[in-house]
Amino acid sequence: MANDSNQSMLWGDHGQEALESAHVCLINATATGTEILKNLVLPGIGSFTIVDGNVVTGEDVGNNFFLTRESIGKNRAQTSMELLQELNDDVTGNFVPESPEQLLEKDPSFFCKFTIVITTQLPESTLLRLAETLWDSNIPLLVCRTYGFVGYMRIVVKEHTVIESHPDNALEDLRLGQPFPELREHLQSYDLDHMERKDHSHTPWIIVVAKFLDKWRSENGGQMPKSYKEKESFRDLIRQGILKNENGVPEDEENFEEAIKNVNTALNITKVPSSVEEILNDDRCTNLTHQSTSFWILARAVKEFMTVEGKGNLPLRGTIPDMIADSDKFIKLQNIYREKAKKDASAVESCVSKLLQSVGRPPESISEREIRLFCRNCAFLRVVRCRSLEEEYGLDTAKKDDIVSLMENQDNEIVLYLMLRAVDRFQKQLGRYPGIYNYQIEGDIGKLKSCLNGLLQEYGLSLTVKDEYIQEFCRYGAAEPHTVASFLGGAAAQEAIKIITKQFVIFNNTFIYNAMLQTSATFQL
């Protein structure tokens, strides 16, 4: 199970290695918690530890697939750990039958040894204390919660760097506008006007576009086709190059059709994306120290490469798309891009070793594989910095203006966030959540409304929340329906895997799911 080939296609061998060396801590083996762990145990995380001092109740068995009737009265961490471990023999399960409050009191550093800590259904005061402990130690925290038909997630991480962001529509890195010397030399070996018919129709489209681009530029003062009209004229120029039979009818040359179709891709101007420029100009890139992570040392090395060897360009990615061509021509072209990418990576490697020396770190602390991976993906680098929970909850630092503007639509998902904060306030004041028993619902509506108004007043928010939301949250009775827990379990595991593998881009920083309407939204709170 741990080496499933589909997974390797998603996050590669190095991603799988990161998963297999991860140690995940789950606080509270609720329905949501066990669903998250299920989705991490199946792809093969190295180990997990469940922290939960509760004993299993009949209610737990009713909504949690990883607890049975025989579990009632036993510790919830232990019984769920045993059943979860059965899903994958390669994963090591541990449990701590204590409450997170006790552990935070006794030994807060306990939580700082994990790759990531995931919490479910945690009271606000405990959550804030845990978040502060992890923030100071730079351990990612993923807060999850199912409350009736509402799902909530919050990622709390100071800085999360991503090398492989896997963008959906990545443009090819072909450099046809300014070919590097090796490519220019290779292009000169082709003469489309004096070529056998078979060779002509099996010349890679990249070569076809490059040759006609030279012709276009010589006739247009060295300029590239930029406007729609110019690109259409350029396509016509390529069309004119298609061979004709003895009757003057154009031959069916698929490589030329490919060239015409790929004009936009081929004419993509080589430039550094603004998001990558921001990273290269970041203080952490400029001011390296002994504590700097590999990501920032690599980013600085790329920046230095750009000023010298790269002449303002990032290292070449070194890949070309599949195309109609004979094997020999395709492989030669592919090797030219590959060799140039290797050469660029070697130049970056020598920058890396100098930088490591300058910050007093051994040269082997960043491997050649890491450098090549970074160079291949340096156009897609991402850095995500989340705000701390302390900032989100602080009276002076909360994003009050954002909340007010979002609440101009009274049914925006942000209202569910306000309601979750209100039920936490209710729990803090009354020691229970609203509407736990049916007979409490009517009386709790007024109490919850005053908790909500108190919250809004405290933050100076002049907002109106519809009564139907207050009534709905009382009817939820803090229940954790399995269908919502299951959905959230899948979504949360996905974010946890992104954090562990440092691949794909996590949301920043709050996710709300409305199961009633099947809608979701993310907010930066």
Image (cartoon, rainbow, N blue to C red):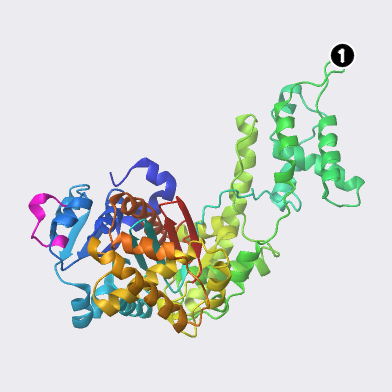
In the picture, measured across the screen, residue 42 lies left or right of residue 398, that is left
Toward the viewer: 94 or 203? Answer: 94
Q: Is 437 left or right of 297, judged from the image as shown? A: left
Asked if residue 183 is among those painted magenta in the image, a careful observer would answer no
**Extent of the magenta region:** 67-77
Task: Give the x, y percent position of residue 123.
Answer: 28, 73
Seen in the image, is 140 located left or right of residue 260?
left
Residue 443 shows up from this direction: yes
Q: Quadrant of residue 493?
A: bottom left
Q: Quadrant of residue 188?
A: top right
Q: For the view shown, which residue lies furthest in the bottom direction?
A: 396
Q: Quadrant of residue 286?
A: bottom right
Give whichever of 504, 370 is nearer the camera.
504
Residue at the spot x=8%, y=60% of the render? 73
Instruction: State how many labels appear.
Output: 1
Q: Is residue 365 visible?
A: no
Q: Which quarter of the image is occupied by the N terminus? A: top left
In the picture, measured across the screen, residue 45 lies left or right of residue 186, that is: left
Q: Which residue shows up at 43% across the image and 77% down it?
A: 453
Position of residue 350 measured from the top left corner of the image (x, y, whole percent): 54, 67
Front residue of 93 and 208: 93
Residue at which label 1 appears? 247
Task: Look at label 1 and name its amino acid.
Answer: Asn
Q: Position of residue 237 (x, y in %)?
A: 85, 36
Secondary element at image label 1: loop
**Residue 84: image x %, image y %?**
20, 52
User: Which residue shows up at 65% across the image and 66% down it?
Assistant: 306
Q: In this rendering, is residue 224 above or below 27? A: above
Q: Residue at x 13, y 59 (%)?
A: 56
427 to 26, vertically: above or below = below
> How crowded is the residue under tag 1: few (<14 C-alpha within 10 Å), some, or many (20+)?
few
